[in-house]
Structures are given as structure tokens and as C-alpha cells.
Amino acid sequence: MPQFTDTSAPGTCIFCRLIAGEIPSAQVYEDAQTVAFMDIGQVTQGHVLVATRRHVPTLLDATPEEAAALMRTAQRVALAARAAFDPAGVMLLQANGAVAGQTVAHLHLHVVPRHAGDGIDFTWPRKNPPASVLEDTAAQLRAALAAR
Ligand code: AMP
Ligand code: ZN
């Protein structure tokens, strides 16, 4: 699990490096202000992170436009998850600051499809599937996004 990254050093931020293509990720969606990609710790099938393109540590540091764009992208991804996986529901989760449980100091929203009986709680029994599983799941979401 990555450590809460020093916000004075955005060049070392894991999500900035991922958005820049320096480290691999299974991307789902991108637009001018946001990027959506698979969380490597899948708490349920289709668990996606929606991040701002710009390095801002928390929601409190974002512009109103970035905050709105984050939610808009989360809705797009949630609709794609519904089309792809037919979940029973979808959770949107977000933490601000290390004390609140944020581990990567780059603003992001978790989109977590909930399946009947998945039994997740805030201890989040993370699974770390192989990259091929993430890429297959991302492809399903991209197809569902494109179909809309
Ligand atoms: P939070 O604890 O809310 O800050 O969430 C950080 C999330 O980033 C966790 O769910 C991690 O599983 C996820 N994560 C960390 N590194 C990567 C990575 N390289 N690619 C995708 N997700 C990551
Ligand atoms: Zn960053």
C-alpha cells in the first residue's frame, strides 16, 4: 500500500505518474479534467478510481469545476458499471487527508459497485487481481461507456 505522498512533491505522486503514463494502469475513461482507472485493490468487481488530472491533494484544494467534473465522471463510470456488471448498487467513497484515511494524496473518488452478498465494510477485504483481470474489467467498462 502506498504511503500518503508529500504534497510538496507532485512529481513523486503515484497517481501523477500513472496519469503521465510512467506507471501502468488499466484506464477506463479520460477527459480534460479527470481520469478514471481500475483500482489495483479491487474491493468488488469494477472498483474504479476517478482522479483529477491536476495534482491537488484533497477535495478542499480543488476548483469548483474540478469538483463538479469528478462527480460527473463518477456518474459516467457508475452508469457504465451498471451496464457492464448489473450491480445491486454503487458506492461513491472519498477520503480527505491522512487522518481521514486517505493514503494517496491526490484527489480521487472511489466508484465501488456493490453486489448482493459481497459483504464489504470499511475494513475492505482487498483483492489484488492480476493486471490481465483489471484490463479485462476496464475493457468491459470502456465498452459500456462507448455504448452510451
Ligand atoms: P485512498 O486510500 O482512498 O487514498 O485510496 C488509494 C487507492 O489507490 C487504494 O485503493 C489503492 O488500492 C489504490 N492504488 C494505489 N496504487 C495504485 C496503482 N498503482 N494503480 C491503481 N490503484 C492504485
Ligand atoms: Zn498527483
Image (cartoon, rainbow, N blue to C red):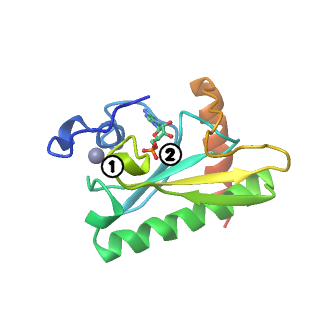
| Tally of numbered tags | 2
- What residue lies at 35% left-to-right and 42% top-to-bottom? 15
Counting from the top left corner in percent of width and height, residue 64 is at 32, 76
Q: Please name the residue that numbered disc 2 is placed on.
A: 37
Which of the 4 image quarters holds residue 23? Answer: top left
The amino acid at mark 1 is His
Q: Which numbered mark, 2 or 1, is in the foreground of this view?
A: 1
Which of the 4 image quarters holds residue 111? Answer: bottom right
Counting from the top left corner in percent of width and height, residue 6 is at 21, 40
Residue 29 vs residue 78, the one in the foreground: 78
Q: Is mark 2 within 8 Å of ligand 1?
A: yes
- What residue lies at 69% left-to-right and 59% top-to-bottom? 90
Q: Locate residue 48 relative to residue 4 in the image: left or right.
A: right
Residue 64, above or below 135: below
Q: Residues within 10 Å of mark 1 (few under 14, many from 20)?
A: many
Q: Residues within 10 Å of mark 2 (few under 14, many from 20)?
A: many
| Residue 85 visible in rendering | yes
- What residue lies at 85% left-to-right and 45% top-to-bottom? 117
Name the outermost residue toward the top.
130
Q: Is mark 1 within 8 Å of ligand 2?
A: yes
Q: Please name the residue that numbered disc 1 is placed on.
A: 106
Which of the 4 image quarters holds residue 59? Answer: bottom left
Circle 2 SS class: strand
> Which image quarter is the C terminus in?
bottom right
Residue 96 vs residue 83, the one in the foreground: 96
Counting from the top left corner in percent of width and height, residue 99 is at 37, 48
Counting from the top left corner in percent of width and height, residue 66 is at 34, 69
Circle 1 SS class: loop
The amino acid at mark 2 is Phe
> Which image quarter is the N terminus in?
top left
The reply to whether discs 2 and 1 touch (Cβ–Cβ < 8 Å) is no
